[in-house]
Image: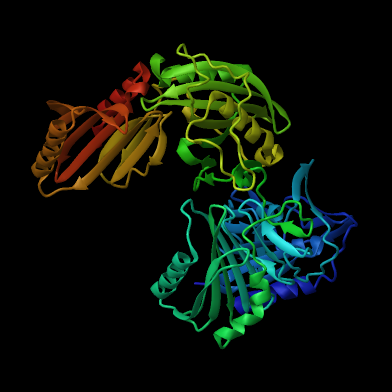
Amino acid sequence: MRVTSAALLASMLTLGAAAVGSPAHAADMQELRLKMGSKEAVMNGEKGNLTRTPYVSGGTLMVPLSAFYKAFGTSSNMGDDNTVRITYGSRAVTLTIGSKVIWTPQGKLESPAAPVMVAGTLMVPLRPVAKGLGAQVSWEGSELVIKLPDQGGSNGESQGPSTKERIGNSYFGWSINNPAGWIQGAGGDDESVATFSDSTGALYLEIHAVKQKVKQDPESLLDALIREAEGQGETVLHEETVTGGDYDYAKIAAEDGDGVLWEERIYYANGHIYAVYLADEKAVHYKDLDKHADLLNSFKPSFDQKDKSTQDLSALKEGTKESYISKYGLTLRIPASWSAVTGQPAYAGPEDQSLRFSVSSVPQGQTLTLWAEQLQQNLKQLFIPEAYRYLGTRELEISGEPGMVIEYETNDGSGWMRHEQGLIIKNGYRYLIDYKAKSGTEAVSSAGDVDISKKNPTAMNTNTGETSGKPAVVSANSAFESFNQIAGSIEIDFDLVKSTYGTLEDNALVADKTKMISKVSYTYGYKLNIPRYWMPVADRFEQPAVEYAFPGGSFRMTAEQSTDPDLTLWQLRSIYAEAAKSDSTFKLKISEDRKIGSVNATEFQIHQVVNGVPLSKRILIFNKEGMIYLLSASLNDANATEEQQAAIDSVLKSFEWTD
């Protein structure tokens, strides 16, 4: 159910903007100064009032949308399904009321809080919207300061993507004539898609770029176009291949299910497939699309870096893109091929590369050196001696603060992984930046010593983002330099963290692995102790399944109704017995003398190799009053320290009935 109709909301946005008159503009940089909990604001040096008081939601400051118009002269348009597009010069931010997903020129991001209507005023998350419009956001004492370059006084009028003759994307290597007066819309977060529309919404342009190693001729491209259109129930009106020019391509004209006519052209060049799609709601015959021929004919599957008449729309620089973790006010640049992990302050890249952030309160008296020693001790508790190599520490400035980096390698049995952990302490909080990548062998001697003095970075083509050689293996040197590059781009809003959070614990760093938390399920009638350093995956104990993860292992418990518990046990026996016959690495031991209170239990102890990783499993199964309970713990051999094995044993022994 919508909060309000699209038409009504559109009128609210328009009236809210018109009521304040023309916004002020500074010569070079416009500025908005705010205070939490106060309507008062300073806009380009002049005092004024916001329509509603800013407030914090989900760790981010929410402000009236009209604040951006008053200070910067942005324009706002209401679309379908409660979407709102905010434009400022060449930039556009698209958000949806009630959704945390926000589209910016840098791609898709998830805001800590969703835009919401409050008594007729649209409140939006300030930081992601401001960043999307190209603003700088920082704290100066108790004031939040937003600075935005002047666009020459747009006065709310939408401008085109650029004032230059052409626009394009240097990373994916394409360019096209600038469609004057059109607005750039939401695209792919990896920049593989770019979208544009005119001010009326009747014309829509979409450009795709996809890597394709196998060369495609125009006839193959045409066949793919036709099959795709017909597969979607659309009517193909014209088809042809165009050869003999600078670039060969295939094109079709078609009508979609809503009666809208469109043309699509597809090219193969430079190891990419490029698709250019244009729809015209006013066209009544496919030949009406010919009036857009000049624009479509101007497309080139190339980008000339030296051509000053072409505006580069790419936010990617040297194969990296800007990203933002709003909950910590953290900005950074990551490799273009990486993606954010949903719901976590973390990123994942190809071939097991990853980056993770965490923030916790500083224990009393702890310094960077003491924290590094704690992490080294934690490593000893989580990995057997043969499975890790502690390499040492080094100093590195991160976000303008003196930091320390811990370097080590681990091996779960499938190969060595290089870790670079950056540490910062500021305003009573400690910031951990954990980078991980596969280790190469050329920089690691048989004794495990690593030479990080050599300079041997992975070569990267800044136009395509492709690295030379295999990116799967990262040498000690390139891991060192990759982390340095990422760390050098990090900016943290330390004041935001201080003003938003209270005491934060990092249970993963609990030194005493025997510390437990008691958990009770009243629905299923049991209680269980869980180590504090285990991380919850699903920990609602009134649900039939709970799950935890810990370094090198996992724990899962299920409780389900069963009409025939003996059959379930027999099936489990059969599965494991068959696995032992067919897999030489699968070792099975069955114990039937276990007791859970007065209930008999069967324990399966398994050792096997999964995807090259040797590991052990302990599985307890028992039933009571028509319910069958299954407790399963898995632990890699590389992590089978005394502390970790003792923790699992304590959990399995702690199970008790509550009645």
Viewer-proximal residue among 213 and 502: 213
Model colouring = rainbow
Viewer-proximal residue among 500 and 240: 240
Give the position of the C terminus as an image quadrant: top left
Q: Is residue 358 left or right of residue 160?
A: left
- Asked if 52 appears above or below 255 in the picture, the reply is above
For this orientation, the residue located farthest to the top is: 447
Q: In this view, does 134 lie to the left or right of 119?
A: right
Viewer-proximal residue among 525 and 639: 639
| Image position, residue 446 (x, y; %) | 45, 13
| Image position, residue 80 (x, y; %) | 57, 74
Taking the spot 64% from the left edge, 50% from the top edge, the residue there is 60
Tally of numbered tags? 0
Res. 394 in view: yes
| Image position, residue 95 (x, y; %) | 61, 62
Res. 367 in view: no
The quarter of the displayed image where residue 45 is located: bottom right
Taking the spot 56% from the left edge, 68% from the top edge, the residue there is 243
| Image position, residue 185 (x, y; %) | 63, 65
Taking the spot 28% from the left edge, 38% from the top edge, the residue there is 557
The quarter of the displayed image where residue 296 is located: bottom right
Taking the spot 81% from the left edge, 56% from the top edge, the residue there is 41
For this orientation, the residue located farthest to the bottom is: 284
- Asked if 305 appears above or below 529 in the picture, the reply is below
Q: Is residue 170 left or right of residue 51?
A: left
Q: Is residue 643 left or right of residue 566?
A: right
- Asked if 523 appears above or below 580 in the picture, the reply is below
The quarter of the displayed image where residue 44 is located: bottom right
